[in-house]
Image (tube, grey):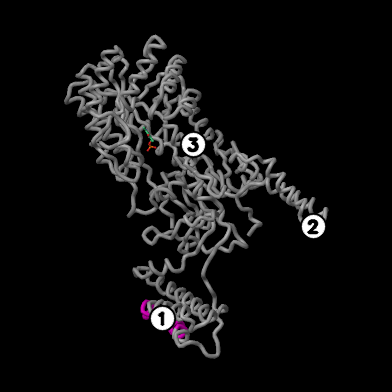
Amino acid sequence: MDYGLNIWGLNNFFINNDKVFLNYANEPSLIEIIKEIESMGYEGPILLRFVHLIKKQINTLYSSFNRAIKEFDYQGRFQAVFPLKVNQFPSFIEPLSKIAPKYNYGLEAGSKAELILAMAYNSISAPITVNGFKDKEMIRMCFIASKIGYNITVTIEGINELYSIIEIAKEFGECLVNIGIRIRLHTGGTGIWAKSGGIESKFGLSATEIIEALDIMKKSDIIHKLTMIHFHIGSQINNIAPLKKALREAGNIYADLIKLGAKKLTAINIGGGLAIEYSQQHTTRDKNYSITEFANDVVFLLKEITTKKHVKMPDIFTESGRFIAAPSTVLITPIIELFSSEYTKNALKLKESNPPLINELHDLYMSLNDTNYIEYFHDALDHLESLLTLFDLGYIDLIDRSNAEVLVHLIIKKVIIFASQKGFKHSELKRINERIQEKYLANFSIFQSLPDFWGLAQRFPVMPITHLNKAPTRSATIWDITCDSDGEIEFNKDNPLYLHDVDLEREEYYLGFFLVGAYQEILGMRHNLFTYPNEATIEFDDDGNYHISNLSSTQTLNDILIDLDYDIEDIHRRLKNLIDEANINNEEKKELLGQILIHLNDTVYLKKDTK
Ligand SMILES: *Cc1c(COP(=O)(O)O)cnc(C)c1O
C-alpha cells in the first residue's frame, strides 16, 4: 500500500520498509526529521518546508519550456514570475529569492503589500508583473519600482487604470512602466477555480475595450509601452483543452494588435493554472496532461498562430504559482487519539432472558461462515434497525441496546475476515467500511492548515509516515481538534483511506499531508483560535546532510489574544481579580495564578500528556 505515492509524489519521496524517506541527498526519513524537531521542544503539528523542492519545481518549469522552445525552433523567450498570492511567507519567499537569479525568475504582485514584497525580493534584472485592481497610489508605486531599475509591467484590468497610468506618467515626465492588457477571453476555465476566465469573468478587457485602449495609448503617445497581453483562465486547470482554446484566442488577439499598430507588443502572459496532481488514486486523476505536454502545446500553438499571421513569435510569460509552491511543503500531524466503536466479547452483558431479536443476533454471530456471511450481515443490520426502534418505543432497555451494538460489531468483524479472504470484492463491503470507521484524532486544525479542503473540498494526499510495512486495516475518518463538525475528513467510500491499527499507549503514529505549499497558509483561518502550526525549513549541505532552520513555534495563548486586539493586561487583571475573590486560601490563590500564567505562555495545540 503506497497511498498513491507514485501518482502524486513527483518522485520526491519513497517508502522503504516501514517509513517514508526523502528521495534526495542522504535520504533522511520524515520521522527522523520530526523527531529531531520534537527533541528541541516542539510539539503538535509541524510544517516542513523543503528548499530543494522549491528549486526542483522552478527548474522543471524552465527546463520544460526551454526544451519545447528548442524542439519547435521557437523564436521567442520563456520568462516566468512567481505570483505572490500563492505563498507570501518569508520562509518561502526568502529561499525562492536565492534560487531565482539563476533563472532570472521574477515576481507577480496583486496588491500594494505584495508589490512592496516584489520590490524588496525580486532580482533587479528579472521581470515584475502587477495584476489586479489598482488605484493611482499603486500605479505610482510601480513607477517608483521602475525608477529603482526594475523591468515592471502593469497589467490593466480596465480602461480607467490606463487613464491613471497616463496621469502618473505626466507626474513623472514619462511613462516609466510597461503596460500589459488583461484580455477577457470567451474561453472559460474548468474545475473548481474556473471563474477567472470566460466572458463573464471579473477580469479583463473585452475586444471593444481593447481597441479603445489601443486608441487611447496612441493618442497619448504611449503605445510603445504596450508590451504584453495577459490572461489567466483559472487555477488548477484540470483539462488541457480550454487552455488550447485560450491560447488560440490570445494568439489571434496578439497578432491583430500588432497589425493595429502595437509595434512593441512582444509578450503573451499565459497566467497560472498549471495543475498539481493531488489524487491518490488512478481513477480520480486531477489533470489530464503533463508539464511536457503543457509546454509543448503553448509553444506549438503560439508558433502556429503567429506564423500564420506573419507576426513575430511572442516571448512567453507564465505566472504559475501552485505548480511551484505546492510540493515544497508537508504538514506532519501526530495522531493523539483513536475513537473506535469496536467491542470485544467481554462487553456483552447477555441476560438470563433476552429479547428474541438479541438471541437471533447471537445465533447469527455464532453460525456465521464463509458462505453465508453476506446474507447474515444483511440480517444483522436489519435486526439492529428493529432493535433501535424497539428501544425508542420503550420495549427494550439500555443493556439490550448495548448488546445489540456489540453483537453487530462482532459480526462485522467476522464478515471482514471472510471478505478479505475473498479479496474484498463485494460491493457491500463498502457499506461495511462505512459502518466501522475508526476516527483518528489528529493534532491540527483543518481550518488553519487545509482551508481549501474545508472551502472547496480540495483533497490533499495524506498518508502515515511510519508503519508502512504493515497492512492498514482501518477505514479511517480524520478528525481535527477544532470543535466544529466540519473539521473532519470523512471516510469516502469512493476514495477510501485506510490507516493502521495502532496502540497509541505504546506507539506513535503520524500523518503527513502533502502538497500543501500553495495557498493554504495564507487562507488558513484561526477558527477556535488554533493558529499556525510549528514550522521548519529543511535544507541540505554539500555533504548531503539535512539542516533545520527557521524553526518557529506555534503561537502562545497570550500572542493569539493580543493578535485579536485584546488588552492582554486586562485579561490578566480580570483573571487575577477572580482568583482574589474566590473562596480559597492564599496559598492556593498564588498557585492557581501561577498556573494560569504558565498556560498563557504555552502554545495552543494539544500536548501528548493531555491524553
Ligand atoms: C492566482 C493567479 C495566478 C496563479 O495561479 P496558479 O494556479 O497558482 O498557477 C497567476 N496569475 C494570476 C493573474 C492569478 O490571479
Percent across and percent down for residue 420 are 41, 70
Q: Earlier in the sequence, mark 1 or mark 3?
A: 3
User: Circle 1 is placed at which residue position?
Assistant: 369
Secondary element type, mark 1: loop
Question: Against 252, is 607 above or below?
Answer: below
Relative vertical location of residue 306 with respect to residue 174 in this rendering, above or below: below
- Residue pushed farthest top? 173
Residue 142 in view in this figure? yes
What kind of secondary structure does the magenta stretch mostly adopt? helix
Q: Is mark 3 within 8 Å of ligand 1?
A: no
| Residue 118 rendering spot, x and y as whole percentages | 46, 26
Using the rendered view, name the quadrant where residue 232 is placed. Answer: top left
Q: How far is mark 2 from mark 1, CA to CA?
A: 64 Å
Tell me: 294 left or right of 544: left
- Identify which amino acid the numbered label 1 is placed on: Asn
Residue located at (47% from left, 65% from top): 437
Q: Secondary structure at mark 2?
A: loop
Q: Which residue is mark 3?
A: 52
**Label 2 Cα neighbours within 10 Å, binned few <14 / some 14-19 / many ≥20:** few
Q: Is residue 69 above or below residue 471?
A: above
Contact? badges 2 and 1 (CB < 8 Å): no
Give residue 318's quadrant in the image. top left
Q: Is mark 2 within 8 Å of ligand 1?
A: no
Residue at the front extreme of this rendering? 581
Circle 2 residue: 584
Q: What type is the residue that disc 2 sits on?
A: Ile
The magenta-colored residue range is 361-375
Nearer-N-terminus badge (3/2)? 3
Camera-nearest residue between 105 and 87: 87
Furthest toward the left, the residue is 308
* Structural crowding at the residue carrying mark 1, measured as other residues with C-alpha within 10 Å and reported as few (<14), some (14–19) or many (≥20): some
